[in-house]
Image: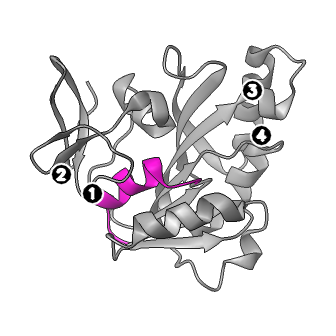
Amino acid sequence: MTELPDGVERRNFDGQQRLSTQGTPVYGEPTDGDWRLWDAGRSKLGAMLESGMAVDLSGVDSVLYLGAASGTTVSHVADFAGPTYAIEFAPRPVRDLIGVAEDRSNLFPLLKDARKPESYAHIVESDLDLLVQDVATRGQAAVAVDNAQFLADDGLLCLAIKARSEDVTADPETVFRRVREELASAYEIVDSERLEPFHADHLGIVARKR
C-alpha cells in the first residue's frame, strides 16, 4: 500500500478506511473531527493513491498543479504540502478556486493556460518537488514536458491522462502508449496504471524528471 505523507491518513468513513486530509472542508465532504474525506471518485490523484500506485509524496513541499478546476483535489494537496500553485484556464472554476484558497494561505490560484508555461514562469518558483497534472486537452504529454522546467532534478510528476481528450475515436491503450513515448524526453516513468473503477478511460502515470 502507498505510504502516505504527513497530513494524509486513512480514516473510517461509512465503515470503510478511506483517504482523508486534515483541513477545512470545501465542498461538503464528510468529516471525522478535523479530517475530511478525499474522495478518489472525484480526484485523479486520490485514485492513484487508492490504487496503490508508486506515488511517493513523502517530503513533498512545493507543488505546481495543472488543471485545478474548482479546487477539489488541489485543496487536499495544499492541506499536506507547502506552497501550491494552482493553474486553471476557465474563469468560472477559478472563482470557486479563489474561495477554496481563502482558508489556505499556501494555495495560490492562477488564471492561466497550462499549455503556455511562459505566461506564469515569472510567478511560479522553480525547483518544485511535485507536478500534478489533470488537464482535459489534446497534447497532455506535451504539457507535462513543457512544465518540467519548474521541477527540481528528480522532481515527481503525477499525471492523469484522459484518453477521450486526446482522440475520441482511438483505442485508449493506443493513446496511452503514445503518451508514454512522448514523456520519455523529459521523464522516467516509475509507474502507470488505469484508474478504473474510479475514472473510466484514464491512465495514471508517476514519473521522475530526468
Depth check: give the residue in front, 102 or 53.
102
Q: Which residues are magenta?
A: 69-83
Residue 29 position, x and y percent, is 31, 41
Q: Which residue is at a point 17% across and 46% down the rendered structure image?
A: 35
Q: Which residue is at a point 82% across and 13% down the rendered structure image?
A: 171
The CA distance from mark 2 to mark 3 is 32 Å
Helix, strand or loop for disc 3: helix
Is 72 in the magenta?
yes
Helix, strand or loop for disc 1: helix
Residue located beneath label 2 in the image: 6
Q: Amino acid at mark 1?
A: Phe
Mark nearer the N terminus (2 vs 1): 2
Helix, strand or loop for disc 4: helix
Residue located beneath label 1 in the image: 80
Q: Amino acid at mark 3?
A: Ala
Is 85 in the magenta?
no
Q: Amino acid at mark 2?
A: Asp
Mark nearer the N terminus (4 vs 2): 2
Mark nearer the N terminus (1 vs 4): 1
Image quadrant containing the N terminus: top left
Check disc 3: other Cα within 10 Å, few if <14, some if 14-19, many if 20+: many
Residue 28 picture quarter: top left
Mark nearer the N terminus (3 vs 4): 3
